[in-house]
Image (cartoon, rainbow, N blue to C red):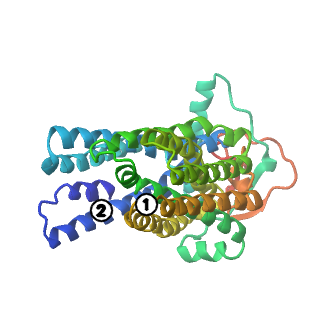
Amino acid sequence: VYLIGSGLTAATSGSGTGWVLFLYATRFIAGTGIGGEYAAINSAIDEMIPARDRGRVDIAVNGTYWAGSILGTLVSLAFLNWIGPVLGWRLAFLVGPALAVVVIYVRRSLPESPRWLLLHGYKAEAEAGTAAIEAEVSEQSGRPLAPVDESEAIELRPAKFTGYDTVLRLAFTSYWRRAVLGATLMITQSFLYNAIFFTYVLVLTKFYGVSATEAPLYLIAFAAGNLAGPLVLGRLYDTIGRRPMIAGTYLLSGTLLIISGYLFDQGVLTAATQTIAWCAIFFFASAGASSAYLTVSETFPVEIRAEAIAVFFAIAQVFGAIGPLLFGALIGSGHDPSLVFAGYALGGALMIIGGVVELLLGVPAENKELEQVARPLSAVSFSQAPRAPMPRGQYSPESPSRRRAAIGA
């Protein structure tokens, strides 16, 4: 869907109202694909990555958004300067679909989540996928995997739990604390990012006199700081823990934004030092923003994980859209830095609120299997009494629907 939408954008060939509407429609289609992908990739990561590495991998993968931002900026600069604006921006929009073709090809070699297969009644396929994963891990490690104790088994009775009505009902009843946590983390980071990122060039050009052609170079430095944060800090979410790291990145980035906003208001920053300040702020904020997706994806039952991500992502985008409108109005109102500082203070305060909510409601999910973090809706009962260890790659003979919780781990 993203490939088609972005490719059609490049086909925009006029400047009238009809072509403007065509442009918006194609971006809507592309955005639909991107929104769906957030749910798909976070679900796949959480269900396929071992518990001990789930945090760092999820945060790192979400952080690679900024690698794409750097690539997109470089491609845009090259095409616009070497080919010209009339054709250059259209070719730039075709780079995304080219990468999407590569992604589709790579996806063909990835196994389906054994959890998804099991919960949809494909027991043989789930077993085969799990056995293949275990065989590969055993071969790479050079030793057989230890048996899983039967006491960790969960009896599942697959049933249809999907549907946004199910997600919303659970969010407002059994999982309301996690719903408040996920919504707060997603909304606050979305507001901050959209507000800063989409008005970045305006601040540089209106307050620091940077030319429109040079502004993207500053954007590359900003994106590099955003990329480095998740890659450097990601492993700490699995070692130090979710709550201290999520709360810490939110509180620290919010505080630093308020401080840098004050320095901006006092006129002591230059374009270079402003960019350095933003790089430092979003080094932490980027890891925090990625952890918001991790929080939502791992704290809801496996049956509704993707839909939960979709719901909270959509909510966050609605509130996030307010940021650029507000900041654009504050910046466009004149050359009064105090108004912009007020916007920065608001964004910083919201991040601090997110950090406080994490301290109060955070879920210690590090190094835990997904079924330990959120009991499957299909679970009939957890095993209580210890049994003989169940060999990997086999079902328990006592019940064809009994399967260990750590499937795929």
Residue 205 x %, y %: 34, 51
User: Which labelled disc corresponds to residue 387?
Assistant: none
Q: Residue under label 1, please give it.
A: 35
- Quadrant of the rendering where the C terminus is positioned: top right
Closer to the camera, 379 or 206?
206
Residue 134 x %, y %: 61, 36
Q: Is residue 290 depicted above or below 179 in this figure? A: above
Closer to the camera, 225 or 162?
225
Query: Disc 1 vs disc 2: which is toward the camera?
Result: 2
Density class for disc 1 (Cα within 10 Å; few <14, some 14-19, many ≥20) is some
User: Which labelled disc corresponds to residue 27?
Assistant: 2
The answer to which quarter of the image holds residue 377 is bottom right
Q: Residue visible at 75% across and 42% down?
A: 390
Q: How many marks?
A: 2
Q: Is residue 324 depicted above or below 83 in this figure? A: below
Q: Residue visible at 49% across and 51% down?
A: 41
Residue farthest toward the right in the current orientation of the protein: 385
Q: Amino acid at mark 1?
A: Gly
- Quadrant of the rendering where the N terminus is positioned: bottom left
Q: Is residue 186 depicted above or below 107 in this figure? A: below
Q: Amino acid at mark 2?
A: Arg
Q: Residue visible at 58% across and 65% down?
A: 304
Q: Secondary structure at mark 1?
A: helix
Q: Which badge, 1 or 2, is on the more N-terminal residue?
A: 2
